[in-house]
């Protein structure tokens, strides 16, 4: 149920402070606290590259547990090998919040060991052959290829 309608002037992407270019749009404001470095968080996400007509390369809503329930992605903020744009987005989201973030190449995948890593082999290979496509990178398409769009829901 929609409780309020935002004016078009109020619906804007803005750059997250200290994020090196990650832009965000609030879809739903959270009511909890924002995580800090060292906090263990659970998120649901739906992600796609900016290029390639926005095909989905991964979504935690597709990762099911034994009972068929979606399994969230769990990580510790500021620890480990998570793409910088996701860390910035989570640090600036309150628990229960949902936002769409546009992650520039410098804050996206720098190598194939950074998470979140799509569990499906086909999706993983498709992502990596798009982002790290040497021919297209040599042609100057790196900014388009490496830009990512994530819809992130901070569960806890």
Image (cartoon, rainbow, N blue to C red):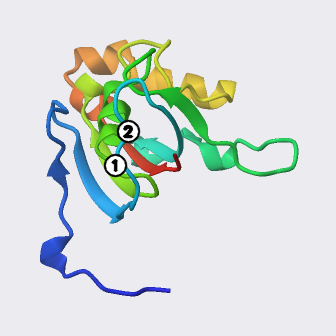
Q: Residues within 10 Å of mark 2 (few under 14, many from 20)?
A: many
Q: Is residue 32 visible?
A: yes
On screen, residue 32 above or below 88: below
Q: Is 104 on the left-hand or right-hand side of 152?
A: left
Q: Nearer the viewer, residue 155 or 121?
A: 155
Q: Residue at x 16, y 35 (%)?
A: 21
* Residue drawn 32% across the image and 41% down it: 89
Residue at the spot of label 1: 93
What is the secondary structure assignment of the residue under circle 1? Answer: loop
Of discs 1 and 2, which sits in the foreground? 2
Name which residue lies at 24% across and 14% down.
Answer: 138
Q: Quadrant of residue 109?
A: top left
Label placed on residue 17: none
Q: In front: 83, or 90?
A: 90
- Can I make out residue 148 in this image? no
Tell me where residue 154 appears, x and y as whole percent. Answer: 47, 48
Q: Is residue 114 above or below residue 55?
A: above
The answer to which quarter of the image holds residue 25 is bottom left
Report x, y in % for residue 29.
35, 64
SS for dot 2: loop
Near mark 1 (Cα within 10 A), the count class, few <14, some 14-19 or many ≥20, is: many
Q: In the current view of this chain or complex, which residue is farthest to the front?
A: 33
Residue 132, image x and y in percent?
39, 17
Task: Work out whether mark 1 precedes mark 2 in sequence or the reverse, and give the earlier one.
Answer: 2
Give me the disc on residue 35: 2
Q: Residue at x 15, y 32 (%)?
A: 18
Say whether residue 6 is left or right of residue 3: left
Q: Position of residue 114 (x, y in %)?
A: 46, 17
Q: Nearer the viewer, residue 47 or 45?
A: 45
Tag 1–tag 2 contact (CB < 8 Å): yes
Q: Is residue 60 left or right of residue 70?
A: left
């Amino acid at each position: 149920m929609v409780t309020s309608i935002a004016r078009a002037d109020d619906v804007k992407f803005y750059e997250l402070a200290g994020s090196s270019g990650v832009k965000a749009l609030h879809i739903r404001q959270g009511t909890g606290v924002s995580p800090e470095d060292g906090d263990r968080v659970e998120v649901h996400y739906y992600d796609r590259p900016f290029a390639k007509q926005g095909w989905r390369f991964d979504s935690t809503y597709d990762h099911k547990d034994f009972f068929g329930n979606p399994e969230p992605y769990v990580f510790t903020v500021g620890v480990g090998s998570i793409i910088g744009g996701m860390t910035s987005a989570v640090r600036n989201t309150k628990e229960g919040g949902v936002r769409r973030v546009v992650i520039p190449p410098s804050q996206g995948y720098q190598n194939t060991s950074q998470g979140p890593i799509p569990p499906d082999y086909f999706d993983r290979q498709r992502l990596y052959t798009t982002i790290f496509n040497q021919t297209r990178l040599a042609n100057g398409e790196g900014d388009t290829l490496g830009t990512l769009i994530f819809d992130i829901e901070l569960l806890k």
